[in-house]
Amino acid sequence: MKTVARVLVFPAYRDNPYINLLGLAARGRGYALIDETRLEGLERTAASLTSGDVVHLHWTTPVVQRAETVKEASERLDRFRTAVDAAAARGARVVWTLHNVVPHDVRHDELELALCRYLADRADVVHVMTADAVEAAAPSYTLDPAKVVVIPHPSYQGVYPSQLSRNDARASIGLGADERGVLFFGQMRPYKGLDTLFAALGCLDATAVRPVLLLAGSVTEADRLTLEAILPAGVRVVWHPGHVADADVEKWLRAADVLVLPYRRILNSGTLHLAATFDLPVVLPDEPHLRAAFGGETWIRWFDTEDPVTSIAGLLDDEATYAVDSAATGDFSHRLSPFTISTRYADLLDRLRATDSA
């Protein structure tokens, strides 16, 4: 197939399925997606881009957050801007996908904010996953509504194996048939509010049968020790502190009764879409942009961000929280199927090419 245009994807983390899912239809239409993960790779590939090509920027962390000093971070920001500006001057278009308003656990705050503001200004298209992301970003920087394109996060329908029965999944992690599993799935980082979830579980009636806390995902040694020190007393914990292989994803999602995302800051969450793929109810923070995007989903429960511990504890103590609505999760996953969403992205690339040709 003839290559219609090149798309530099940065950073393209190979262990994150989102990038591959988004590009499915584009590859089928002849776009050559070039993956880079390091600033040096971006500079090298961007130097070859011309009219009709695209620089598609995702997470900003590799630009300044990899630097040890402010001086080095500033130099990396200058290199990044120079590479992107030069590609744009030769006719390449710039797309920025807004995954977070600013990255989590930022070291060089001012330079990171300068980077985000640069991208908001330089990008021809700012891709957001929910319409209210523009408002969520407003305290930090301004997004021109004329540049904004909404393409939702895809579901994971058909991506991961889905063959285990619920009973087999529960048995595989040592969860009893009568036990209730409360799952946190994904990277375990301080900003994700695990201390809040632990405190909420600790608030539950000690004389009643408490849920089992299920933890699965990678964690640094320092964070693991911190989390171990605050695990709730009197709560059984099943913990896999490491990368979850694709073949094992269904084991955790099938075994659990509810997924809790106790995040302090969240713009988008692929884990939410993963839960829907496995018909799992989800507890989310009641943030305005999330409520606007998902407020009609009956399988989502909302906790009060002003009093998260009490609110999450109340939800975990409520039988209704664990009710499964397979019709609703199935509709959600089908509506946002990977190919459907990737087609919308390919359509965006086609529109950019058409504009260049006009």
Image (cartoon, rainbow, N blue to C red):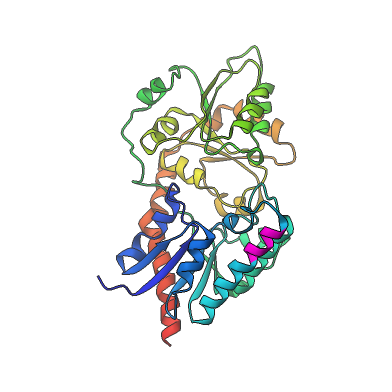
Q: Is residue 104 left or right of residue 110?
A: left
Along the line of sight, the residue nearer the viewer: 13 or 202: 13
Q: Residue at x 51, y 62 (%)?
A: 40
Using the image as rendered, state which of residue 101 and residue 326 is in the foreground: 101
Q: Residue at x 44, y 79 (%)?
A: 50
Residue 310 appears left or right of 126: right
**In the image, is residue 75 part of the stretch drawn in magenta?**
yes
* Image quadrant in which the N terminus is located: bottom left
The vertical placement of 294 against 95, above or below, is above
Is residue 123 visible in this depiction of the protein? no
- Residue 234 sits above or below residue 166 on the image: above
The span shown in magenta is: 71-77
The image quadrant that residue 39 belongs to is bottom right
Tell me what residue is drawn at x 39 percent, y 22 percent. 172
Could you tell me which quadrant the C terminus lies in? bottom left
Q: Main secondary structure of the magenta part?
A: helix
- Left or right: 36, with 210 as reference point: left
Foreground pick, 148 / 64:
64
Work out whether residue 277 can be spotted. Answer: yes
Looking at this rendering, what residue extends furthest in the left direction?
1
